[in-house]
Image (tube, grey):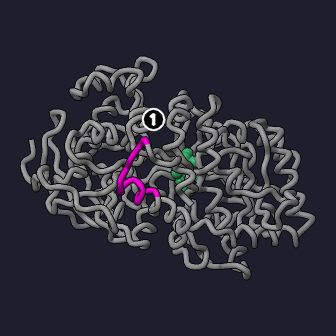
């Protein structure tokens, strides 16, 4: 099966006293800047950088999508293998930004395709997604067991989202020494559920295919496999961790997560403060920082101009820059636009997004109905997202559920005030302007998922923008001062890795929450 690469199966794992949990393999389907469809990529790019700065030996593995191969630069073949009838090579390179080592699982039959990592150009899931990510997980498991040219073995494998859910299961099935596993849930709505016979074809022990294993309502669930078999499970905000254990937000995983409660915790995402920095962002036409935000006005003019909106500095400019899906309440925003436009004649709205075809068409129609006031770009453009956060006054970000949300964190860093629903990581990161419990207020929060609730919050926000300018600037300064950098959360992950990579005694261990400061 293994054509090259060192067979290290007989080597013992290195002692884990001082350096316990120091060597970590991050496995994810997307890692910025090699591939990105959303926040998962941002986190999997930035967190390893922050951990490396704290002294951890970080390496990453992801599929070799065409865009990843283009962005990665120089690559070497590290090993070749045949898995699930597919011939693949594992290529070794370095991340273009951080220089951290990365392995790309290169299997052109599975990954060299147009469209996104998950869907074809018409928005349909690739029919062989189980095979694609099962092969990826098996290749990652081989690397984790030391089948790589250096015989490098991690103390901990950190797997992200359903695409890597099989990895904790495969390592659980190992009879020899193996690294500990941490599985992070970024979005429990995406579960990777497939026909049981597809999983059976991997030759897994039957127990893995039962309800006590990874069977989920008659299917095999990659998400459940990760939750069930990882040594510890985390998610991306404390609020979402609590919500995931309820039927409203757990998407059927709430029971299992409650069962595993003492191995489950929420760690708030951070942002890459180098990539998202209005003081030096190469995507912007002008730069600024707190307390002198003069350059933001130039960014606003440029944004209005490029979107075909009236160039008026004192017209409030709201943006939306998220996937166009029901998760993001894009449907509620869409149906609210006529009422919003009627109530606030000076308000401008600029939107970038892609997602549900009907929503894309609906927003495009709104831009035709309100020319010069509603501007819409359907698509995905990283650079424009930066320019929008810099040029806007307000970010409209409702969500039916939001595990963390990075968009509102980016907006705040650029002095754009978030208007969000009180849910998940949004509630953990935004403080309402009427919250008298703290002076560190940063935005506007609404409850529920109705258009009325969103419009009411917008009314409050625009009242401050138009009539309480000093309060608006104070909110802006607070938002820009809020520390959403990775340092604190990376330290929490490091503590967790140490705990996992050290002597792991499930029966005796204290609940994780108590152990992670
Ligand atoms: P999610 O991962 O659920 O989509 P997040 O807020 O965590 O939500 O992260 C979304 C990321 O994707 C952010 O970096 C955001 O700027 C980016 N993004 C989303 N849609 C677009 C788009 N159409 N163009 C550019 N960037 C986008
Ligand atoms: C998911 C979630 C989002 C989170 C991101 C990164 O895509 O929907 O809330 O910020 O992952 O963890």
Q: Residue at x 53, y 66 (%)?
A: 486
Which x, y percent locates residue 218?
Answer: 41, 17
- Residue 156 is left or right of residue 175, and the answer is right
Which x, y percent locates residue 423?
Answer: 69, 44
Where is the C terminus found, in terms of image quarters?
A: bottom right
Which x, y percent locates residue 225?
Answer: 39, 34
Which x, y percent locates residue 9?
Answer: 13, 49
Q: Quadrant of residue 33?
A: bottom left
- Residue 435 is left or right of residue 95, and the answer is right
Q: Is residue 86 above or below residue 442?
A: above
Where is the N terminus found, in terms of image quarters?
A: top left
Q: Residue at x 79, y 46 (%)?
A: 446
Q: Residue at x 75, y 53 (%)?
A: 419
The residue segment tinted magenta is 496-507
Residue 498 lies in magenta, yes or no?
Answer: yes
Q: Nearer the viewer, residue 108 or 213?
A: 213
Q: Quadrant of residue 250?
A: top right
Q: Quadrant of residue 507?
A: top left
Task: Report the residue that reaches farthest toward the top.
Answer: 218
Residue matched to label 1? 123
For the question of whether residue 379 can be seen, the reply is: no
Q: Is residue 96 above or below residue 419?
A: below
Residue 514 lies in magenta, yes or no?
Answer: no
Q: Residue at x 36, y 60 (%)?
A: 21
What is the tally of numbered marks visible in this picture? 1
């Amino acid at each position: 099966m293994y054509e090259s690469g060192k067979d290290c199966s007989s080597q013992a794992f290195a002692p884990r006293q001082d350096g316990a949990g120091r060597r970590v393999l991050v496995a994810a389907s997307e890692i910025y800047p090699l591939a990105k469809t959303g926040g998962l990529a941002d986190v999997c790019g930035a967190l390893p950088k922050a951990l490396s700065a704290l002294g951890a030996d970080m390496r990453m593995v992801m599929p070799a999508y065409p865009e990843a191969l283009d962005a990665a630069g120089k690559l070497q073949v590290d090993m070749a293998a045949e898995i699930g009838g597919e011939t693949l090579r594992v290529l070794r390179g370095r991340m273009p930004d951080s220089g951290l080592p990365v392995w790309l699982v290169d299997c052109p039959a599975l990954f060299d395709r147009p469209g996104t990592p998950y869907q074809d150009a018409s928005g349909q899931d690739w029919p062989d997604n189980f095979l694609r990510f099962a092969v990826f997980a098996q290749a990652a498991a081989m690397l984790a067991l030391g089948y790589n040219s250096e015989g490098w073995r991690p103390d901990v494998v950190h797997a992200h989202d359903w695409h890597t859910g099989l990895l904790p299961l495969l390592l659980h099935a190992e009879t020899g020494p193996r690294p500990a596993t941490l599985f992070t849930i970024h979005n429990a709505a995406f579960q990777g559920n497939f026909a049981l016979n597809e999983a059976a074809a991997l030759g897994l022990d039957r127990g893995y295919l039962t309800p006590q294993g990874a069977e989920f309502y008659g299917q095999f669930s990659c998400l459940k496999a990760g939750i069930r078999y990882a040594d510890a499970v985390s998610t991306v905000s404390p609020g979402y961790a609590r919500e995931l254990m309820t039927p409203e937000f757990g998407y059927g995983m709430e029971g299992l997560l409650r069962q595993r409660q003492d191995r489950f915790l929420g760690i708030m995402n951070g942002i890459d403060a180098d990539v998202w920095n209005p003081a030096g962002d190469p995507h912007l036409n002008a730069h600024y920082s707190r307390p002198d935000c003069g350059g933001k006005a130039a960014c606003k003019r440029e944004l209005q101009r490029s979107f075909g909106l009236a160039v008026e500095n004192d017209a409030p400019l709201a943006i939306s820059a998220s996937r166009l899906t029901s998760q993001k309440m894009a449907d509620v925003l869409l149906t609210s636009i006529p009422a919003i436009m009627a109530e606030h004649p000076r308000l401008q709205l600029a939107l970038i997004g892609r997602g549900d075809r009907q929503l894309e068409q609906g927003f495009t129609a709104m831009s035709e109905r309100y020319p010069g006031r509603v501007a819409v770009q359907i698509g995905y453009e990283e650079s424009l997202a930066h320019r929008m956060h810099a040029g806007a006054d307000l970010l409209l970000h409702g969500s039916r559920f939001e595990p963390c949300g990075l968009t509102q964190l980016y907006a705040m860093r650029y002095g754009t005030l978030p208007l969000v629903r009180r849910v998940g990581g949004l509630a953990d990161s935004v403080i309402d302007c009427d919250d008298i419990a703290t002076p560190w207020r940063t935005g506007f929060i609404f409850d529920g998922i109705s258009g009325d609730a969103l419009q009411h919050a917008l009314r409050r926000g625009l009242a401050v923008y138009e009539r309480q300018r000093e309060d608006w600037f104070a909110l802006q300064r607070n938002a820009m001062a809020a520390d959403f950098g990775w340092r604190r959360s990376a330290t929490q992950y490091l503590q967790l890795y140490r705990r996992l990579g050290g002597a792991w005694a499930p029966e005796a261990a204290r609940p994780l929450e108590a152990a992670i400061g």
